Amino acid sequence: MWDLQRHLHDEVVAGRRTDTLVLVEHASVYTAGRRTASWDRPLDGTPVVEVDRGGKITWHGPGQLVGYPIMRLAEPVDVVRYVRCLEQAVIDACAALGVRTMRVEGRSGVWLPADGDRRERKICAIGVRVAKGVTMHGFALNCDPDLSEFDRIVPCGISDADVTSLTAELGHDVAIADVVPAVLAALERALADVRWTPAAEDAPTPGAFQPASHT
């Protein structure tokens, strides 16, 4: 998947491909962003894949919808605004599915508030990279994963909060296929203002994201 991302990124940078969205359900894997500390990693020697996104360590695997928008950002490039738009897309998608989520100041991703004896809990991790004005990496939304996979690490380097999923919050199984339509619609809306649009009147404007096949 990393090789596919780089290839698609190069294609978009070169103008040979329009904005592209990859949606995938990974096999179980831990990935470490550039700010991952040694104490965030698994203590049992579990392999970790080093990646060049921002953020720290997280888990990807079955039951989690991972999205990689590979798109040219509008000038001037504003990475923080792009991350906020990704968060808003996930917040909107979760709302459409019946789960109210929020941002937490100083922390990326999408969260549920503390309530009763439960701490704040993250339902979606976000980590991105922008090179030559084009985005890579993206978001990981927990639909129906085995949340115990996060027990081996300090997810995103945050030790004073927990992780959750749509299934855990709604009390019934939520399949990835049930989530994709809401996510696609929310991404199209939320990212519209940060996507690059050609200045020339006769130039083609970005339309819907072009899907990319994956294995």
Image (cartoon, rainbow, N blue to C red):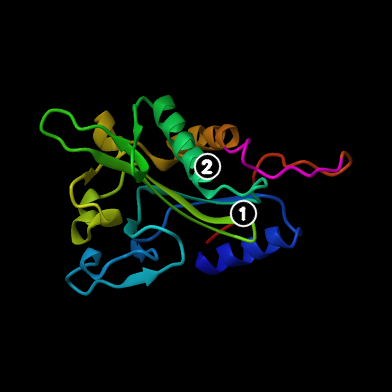
Q: Residues within 10 Å of mark 2 (few under 14, many from 20)?
A: few
Viewer-closest of 167 and 140: 140
Task: Residue at 35% x, 64% y: name it.
Answer: 35
Q: Amino acid at mark 2?
A: Arg
Decide: marks 1, 2 in contact (CB < 8 A)? no
Front position in the image: 113 or 181: 113
Q: Residue at x 20, y 45 (%)?
A: 161
Q: Residue at image x 35%, y 56%?
A: 61
Instruction: Please provide the residue range marked out in magenta.
Output: 191-200
In the rendered image of this protein, does residue 55 appear above or below residue 188? below
Where disc 2 sits, the SS reads: helix
User: SS class of the residue under badge 1?
Assistant: loop
Is residue 91 part of the magenta span, yes or no? no
Q: Position of residue 7 (x, y in %)?
A: 63, 66
Kindly identify which residue carries mark 2. 81
Give me the residue at 61% from left, 54% from top.
212
Tag of residue 212: 1
